[in-house]
Amino acid sequence: MTMEYRRLGSAGVRVSALSLGAWVTFGGQVGEDVAQECMTRAYDAGVNFFDNAEAYADGNAEIVMGAALKKLGWARDTFLVSSKVFWGGSGPNQQGLSRKHVFEACHAALRRLRVEYLDFFFCHRPDPSTPIEETTRVMHDLVTQGKVLYWGTSEWSAQQIAEACQLADQRNLYRPQMEQPEYNMFHRERVEREYRELYARYGLGTTTWSPLMSGLLSGKYLDGIPHGTRVTLPGYAWLKQKFESDVTRSRLGCVRKLKGLADSLECTLAQLALAWCLKNPHVSTVITGASRPEQVTENMRALDVLPRLTDEVMARIETTLREAAS
């Protein structure tokens, strides 16, 4: 297993093809000791990007990650760390993408993560109440101040990203360099079609999330919802409702077929799903999650599966997915 490193779109920085994110797990399912072990397993496997956000566990995920980074003492030029801004609190200026909130959220993330700068800073969602120019300008200022190296978006439409890029070009500001969209076998439209023009025109990179569709593509929900999974966590009733929907139930048959294909390739279903995401040349990195160090090790082995995804295997996956959608 050898880590692959990819450029973040047109940028010179290189990110590990697989990365580790803190959503749901850090500060929620796991504490500092387990988080540190997960990060160590990932780092030793070649992972150099660790993803976070102000909204994850109300900031506790960043505190946990920051404590781990301090204890581990890695050289700053060997890892990349991110935060995302949008949901910072309940006050009138603690949410959204106003100049005030973006500025203060950046400094709060720096304190929690115990770093002097963020490699990546994402606008976690679009903010219809704030002009895109205002957000673009404050992100530009944070870059010029050396507090952020690259800024980007998460779950913005292609039109919104293009507007930010055009404004940046017109006013000689730093463009958004990357987008963080959901991407997996069942969620493909935005990455594969909507953003297509942005890759060539603006050199957009992608740091994709939910490659296992919150565990559906790991196969662990084939026989119901096990206790202790994220679907059963307090505050995630929306996710449980999604899993109990008719759409999800209809996809379980497809998951069973994909599990059979994974067995024939001598890999787990999760490894197959991760490798499938990596096959897309427009994916800069696939963000993985883990609540146990052993999950990190298993996920990293998806790199060994990647060469097995021949054109024939990819065609079989496509046929299976198409049948499930019909």
Image (cartoon, grey):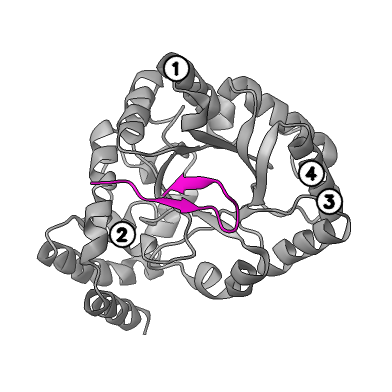
Mark positioned earlier in the residue sequence (1 or 4) = 1
Check the image and name the residue furthest to the front. Answer: 12
Q: Badges 1 and 3: C-beta atoms under 8 Å apart?
A: no
Q: Which x, y percent locates residue 243?
A: 38, 58
Name the residue that disc number 1 marks. Answer: 73
Mark positioned earlier in the residue sequence (1 or 3) = 1
At a point 65% along the width and 44% down the height, the residue shown is 150
Check the image and name the residue furthest to the right. Answer: 171
Q: Against 71, is 79 above or below?
A: below
Q: Nearer the viewer, residue 155 or 116?
A: 116
Name the residue that disc number 3 marks. Answer: 130
Q: Nearer the viewer, mark 2 or mark 4?
A: 4
Mark positioned earlier in the residue sequence (2 or 4) = 4
The amino acid type, in three-letter code, at marker 4 is His
Mark positioned earlier in the residue sequence (1 or 2) = 1
On whether residue 30 falls in the magenta region, the answer is no
Which element carries disc 4, helix, strand or loop? helix
Name the residue that disc number 4 marks. Answer: 140
Quadrant assignment, res 245? bottom left
Q: Is residue 102 visible to us here? A: no
Mark positioned earlier in the residue sequence (4 or 3) = 3
The amino acid type, in three-letter code, at marker 1 is Gly
Mark positioned earlier in the residue sequence (3 or 2) = 3
Write the start and end of the magenta stretch as one range: 1-16
Q: Which x, y percent locates residue 74?
A: 44, 22
Badge 1 crowding class, 10 Å Cα cut-off, few under 14, some 14 to 19, many 20 or more, is few
On whether residue 8 falls in the magenta region, the answer is yes
Q: Which x, y percent locates residue 54?
A: 61, 34
